[in-house]
Amino acid sequence: MRFGALARVLTAGALALAAVPVTQQVAHANVPLLTAAQRQAYLYYYAPAILKRGNENAGQAGRDWITNYDFDQDGNYSTNRVNWVKVNQYVDAAATGAPSPYDRWRIRPTLYSSLIEFTEGGSKSLVLLYHVYNAADKEGSAIHDWERIEIVIRNVTGTPGGAEYASSATLTHHHDHVMRRSYDSGFNFMNTATGRHLLVWQADEAGSSTGTHAHELRFVADPYSWIAGQSPGAGAEVRVSGKSERKNLHYAFVPQASSAAVSAWRATPVTYGSAAALASRVDNEDRVSWSAVKRVTYELQDLADVIPTHWQQSNWYTHWLSAESVDISLESPVLNEAGQPEVSTGLQRFYTRSRDVGASDLTDGRNGIPSKNWFFGAYSAEQDEDFPSGSDDFKAYEGQGTDSFGRTRGMASGRLDSHGAYWWQHDFFVHSGGMDSAETREAGKWLVGAWYTPENGGFDGRWVQLFDDRPGAQ
């Protein structure tokens, strides 16, 4: 094995602790698994509405669109920054309607998602993950800006909009993970007949002169009823978490599958034909009217679409560098939409350092999805937004991070040899919503043993592709 001989000599006490969660698995035959269609439905039903500030004057039209990893259709993530900073040329070419090298681009604003399904006490819960992708950051000097939204849904019955409820949501805020619970003020949704959409504000890519910066996410503190009640000529701005003053917005991105949300916002997709009309072209300090806000639809794709690009046996070197890697023990393969494996089982290495062909040293030092702690739920939840960020380190990988029951991830999985050595594929920490001030303890629990199996009413969607890739689609 690539770690050398993994330590397997454990004390009798540790073995006993590790065995407890594995042997206490209980079948949940009375709680049926969701179908693939139901999983897609929940992901779209709770997909967030993102109200975004732009910074697109001075020849930067379109720079603050959300996009997808292959917007330029070259199959190479390492070119994303150098191509994205030319998006204004795409917009200008689109305005003429004439053929150009840019007419093959497919911006397709996208959130990369996954769904974790687990059963406890006869009740089903979901953790919904949404990854907001921007191809460039820091005023075009950095590549691949990853921003994460997590929503925990309880009492799931199989039909979105039924008896279930959103118990909490967590946003990535630079290195912090800011949580709001169902009983907190500033936890607001756009409720429609086709979805319940968490209201999230996102900054533009520019610096901190406006007090928020670099695509950071914040909770919208105004209820949707207030937003809907604004006159078309009023200034478009909302209160956001952690700030006393309202912040400008120039875009509204809503999920294309929620027809009521699309209708309410009158949102349309970015295509070569619509691009010129959907670019804001204003400075981040400019306040526009609500009627001038650009309303754009986005689609969902899968986090599992991106995972194989990091894999040691793929052409990872096209997209990533080997300066950073993570090892994950896979019990089941990563599957595509047709159910075919794209990554094999066993102990697998994933290379994650960002590769940027336009940088002199080929990187900005950022790391890809498999290296993100939130991918395993292994983060320290906070209530406040700090800058610079000051989050506790949960130290879950090292085996120090414990849940409300005193369990580490290795104790929950029965794999104590994983501590500090590798992630197990199904390691995941579900936050309960409580706040724990201890540096290496969080309120919630590590999912235990074979939680992810059909017999135990579970499904680990981080490794499964649910949504059709739609290659070449506008």
Image: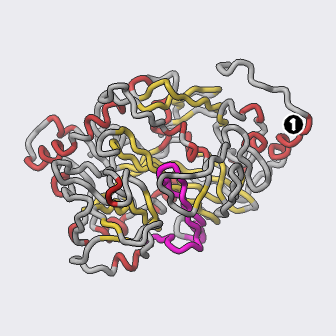
| Extent of the magenta region | 162-190
Report if residue 274 is visible in the image.
no
Q: Secondary structure at mark 1?
A: helix
Query: Mark 1 is on which residue type?
Result: Leu
- x then y, percent, for residue 28: 74, 55
- x then y, percent, for residue 451: 71, 47
Is 17 magenta? The answer is no
Instruction: Tell me the crowding category of disc 1: few under 14, some 14 to 19, or many 20 or more residues within 10 angstroms, Cα based.
Output: some
- Residue lying at the far right of the rendered structure: 12
Is 179 magenta? The answer is yes
Residue at 74% in and 19% down:
5
**Where, by quadrant of the figure, is residue 358 drawn?**
top left
**Where, by quadrant of the figure, is residue 29 drawn?**
bottom right
> Height in image: 376 above or below 222?
above
- x then y, percent, for residue 430: 65, 54
Counting the numbered discs, the total is: 1
> Height in image: 335 above or below 375?
above
Q: How is the image coloured?
A: secondary structure
- x then y, percent, for residue 73: 28, 35
> Height in image: 463 above or below 276?
above
Residue at 18% in and 54% down:
57
> Height in image: 308 above or below 194?
above
Left or right: 118 in relation to 251: right
Report if residue 35 is visible in the image.
yes
Foreground: 214 or 134? 214
Q: If the image is split into quadrants, where does the N terminus sit?
A: top right
Residue at 65% in and 19% down:
2
- What residue sits right under mark 1 in the picture? 15
